[in-house]
Image (cartoon, rainbow, N blue to C red):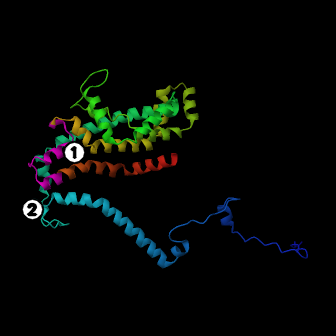
Amino acid sequence: MTVTTPSPARGQAPVPTPPAVSPRTARRRPPGVRTAATRTLISDADLNRGRGRLVYRVILVTMAVLFALIFIFPLYWMVTGAVKTPVELAQPTPTLIPQTWHPETYAEAWTKLEIGRFLLNTAFYTVGGWLIQLVVDVAAAYALSKLRPILGKLVLGMMLASLMLPAAALLVPSYLTVVDVPIFHVNLLNTPWALWLPGAANAFNIYVLKRFFDQIPGELIDAASIDGAGRFRTLWSVVLPLSRPVLSVVSIFAVVGAWKDFLWPLLVLRDPEAQTISVALSRLSFTGYVTQNEMFAGLAIASLPMIIIFMIFQRGILNGLSAGALKG
């Protein structure tokens, strides 16, 4: 039996026939959802042409190379400046490529500047500060997110308000606190605690951790409580394993911040034997005892540990940043 489409009545406009949709498009597009055109600097029609695709790739590669050179050039200048002679560094017209190479400058700087001892000092301060900061920030973020104490929102707001203050405004109160710790009346100058305690509670890290903890389902916390787990057990066995991406990001922030810190260690570490690598290099640069190429070598060696850490953990850092963006 043949089914015929009824013709429109006399005087009525014909009903338009909808365009045919391929089965693949029908499966890909949900019912009732309209697809909006994406606005870009280069239209899809231009990208489909050979010339448009070539222009797009040239612009993309040019911008990528330009930004890479902007970030890499200071590092290149520091590394190559160490293998130049002091006379070549003092020339009015700088040279991008060293005329004569002297790689032994790195060994001389290592011995002359006692870089090994200052690197150990910095590593000790960095690891201790990282551990203390991680414990304090995780505990504070977990309490604000899951325990929900009284006036928790007020406390969080005050911590976030502290981020609006410049770091220099907190130097004098922090220094007076370290010189005479309230209640205990202890002087912490020239001790590791002068570096660790003021940076233990980091408002930015607490906020990042809290935002991540907020996305953890409450059913998991309730299930752990039903199984008899306490608050600490729930944090250790449930929350922390799920928070590895954001913990890696916070750890990198803490380690890099402690390693490159200069002004605060300069104030609280008066003993030259206990100074960090950045403070020691700054002090030695004004003595006239170190040449300019040796100072370049010392700066390059001091930067090497952070570069190695980033190269090793770059995948975890990027995954953690992506996870934090999706969770937020």
- Counting labels gives 2
Q: Please tell me whether residue 285 belongs to the stretch shown in magenta.
A: yes
Q: Disc 2 marks which residue?
A: 87
206 on left or right of 30: left
317 on left or right of 218: left
x and y, in percent, of residue 115 in the image: 16, 45
Which of pointers 2 and 1 lies earlier in the amino acid sequence? 2
Q: Please tell me whether residue 221 belongs to the stretch shown in magenta.
A: no
Three-letter code for the amino acid on which mark 2 is drawn: Val
Q: Disc 1 marks which residue?
A: 278
Prevailing secondary structure class for the magenta stretch in the rendered image: helix
Three-letter code for the amino acid on which mark 1 is drawn: Ser
Q: In this view, does 150 lie above or below 204?
A: above
Quarter in which the N terminus is drawn: bottom right
Q: What stretch is highlighted in magenta?
A: 272-297
x and y, in percent, of residue 270 in the image: 18, 35
**Hey, which quadrant is residue 247 in on the image?**
top left
